[in-house]
Each structure stands twice: as structure tokens, then as C-alpha cells.
Amino acid sequence: MAASSPWPLIHAEREALATDLAALTAEQWATPSLCPDWTVRDVFGHIIATARMTPPAFFAGLARAGFRFHTMSANNIAAEASATPAEALAEFRTLLTATSHPPGPVEAMLGEAVIHGEDIRRPLGIKREYPAAALTRVADFNKRSNLLIGSKRRIAGLTLKAADLDWQTGSGPEVTGPALSLVMAMTGRAAVLGDLSGDGVATLRSRM
């Protein structure tokens, strides 16, 4: 049976993020996110740029950046930086139900919504109960993907087991914890390692 479209889950995550960010102060927008060297405002700019991205725009931007992906991402953030947070939120709300995306699996866009949403929320102390369906799909996608962030390599030889969902993957020393923390850890967010336990945590930490 073909998997259902991830777009309803993506759109719901965008809506939830817009709601959570509506009342942020200027200081909160400047808070360091879980992404190295990116503030909350920077991550939000990246989310906006990705939500409006198309394959032709992606390749054009990559060429302008000398085919360096991280340079292209920095350029996209810089292009969004001139807008005030209020203007950025207004722009984001026009994209809540957009289905444009860069080249690659649409499933990656769900990871974009969940993972970058948490990159923003966690440093701000904002809690979200992500739907189990969204967490499971993001975990399943990333466990087999080395796209850009090397999740598959990071968890090789380890068993990851969610404590709050019926989900696990791999074999070897065990890493147990909340499904969201497992997703964030497999995508390189060392800040969540304190949420995890098991004989495999030290190995996972060494791969951050």
C-alpha cells in the first residue's frame, strides 16, 4: 500500500509553528538555535526559503553559491534577514499550505518542519506534542538517509528505541528515549543527548 501524502502533516506543523512564534520578543528572535551559528530568526528564514523553493530555483541558487550547499543556505537566510519578524511571519503564513519544495523526496520536507521547528522551540522553552504519525515518518526517513546530514551513518551499528512510541531501528548497543529526541540526535543535535540512555549513547555522542 502506498504511503499517504506527508503534506497534511507538513502543513499542520507550519501552522503550529506560526502560532508558537507569534508572540516572540526581539530578544527571543535573537536566541541561538540548535543549529550552530544560526539564531531562531535565521532558522525561521531558512524554513521560509525552503517552503517557497522549487527545483529550478534550487539549482540556480546552488550555481550562484559556487555549488556549495551551506553557502547557498547562508545566502537564502541573508535574503530573508531584511524583513522584520512580523513581516517574516506574514510571509510564512502565505506558505502554510504550499507544496513547493527543493529537489528530492517530499518526505524530507516533513523532517524540515519537525526538526527545524524543534531547533527553534527547544532553546526558547516552547513545548510541542508532535503527532506520533509525524515523528514516526521523520524517524523512518532519516534512519535510511545520509542526505546532507548523514543520519544513517550516525546511527550505524546502534539500536534506537523510542520510549514513547512503538518504534525502533537497527541492531547493536541500545539508545533509548523519547522519539523526538532520537530524531534530533540522529540528525546531529547534541543538545538532546541528555534525554537519552543506554550503552549506545557514548557512541552516538562521539559521532556528533
Image: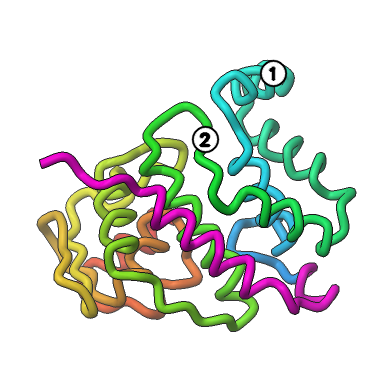
Q: Residues within 10 Å of mark 1 (few under 14, many from 20)?
A: few
Is the stretch drawn in magenta largely helix, strand or loop? helix
Q: What kind of colouring is applied to the model shown?
A: rainbow
Considering the numbered disc 1 on the image, is that residue within a helix, a strand or a loop?
Answer: loop
Res. 153 image quadrant: top left
Magenta stretch, residue numbers = 1-30
Q: Residue at x 17, y 65 (%)?
A: 167
Residue 170: where, in percent of width, then height?
14, 54
Q: Residues within 10 Å of mark 2 (few under 14, many from 20)?
A: some
In magenta stretch: residue 3: yes
Q: Earlier in the sequence, mark 1 or mark 2?
A: 1
Eyeballing the image, is 111 above or below 136? above
| Left or right, 117 with reference to 151 | right
Residue 107: where, in percent of width, then height?
36, 43
Eyeballing the image, is 124 above or below 167? below
Considering the numbered disc 2 on the image, is that residue within a helix, a strand or a loop?
Answer: loop
CA separation in Å, label 1 and label 2: 21 Å
Q: Which residue is mark 2?
A: 101
Residue 146: where, in percent of width, then height?
35, 38
Residue 82: where, in percent of width, then height?
89, 49
Along the line of sight, the residue nearer the viewer: 21 or 93: 93
In magenta stretch: residue 126: no
Q: Which residue is mark 1?
A: 66
Q: Quadrant of the C terminus?
A: bottom left
Circle 2: residue type: His
Circle 1: residue type: Gly
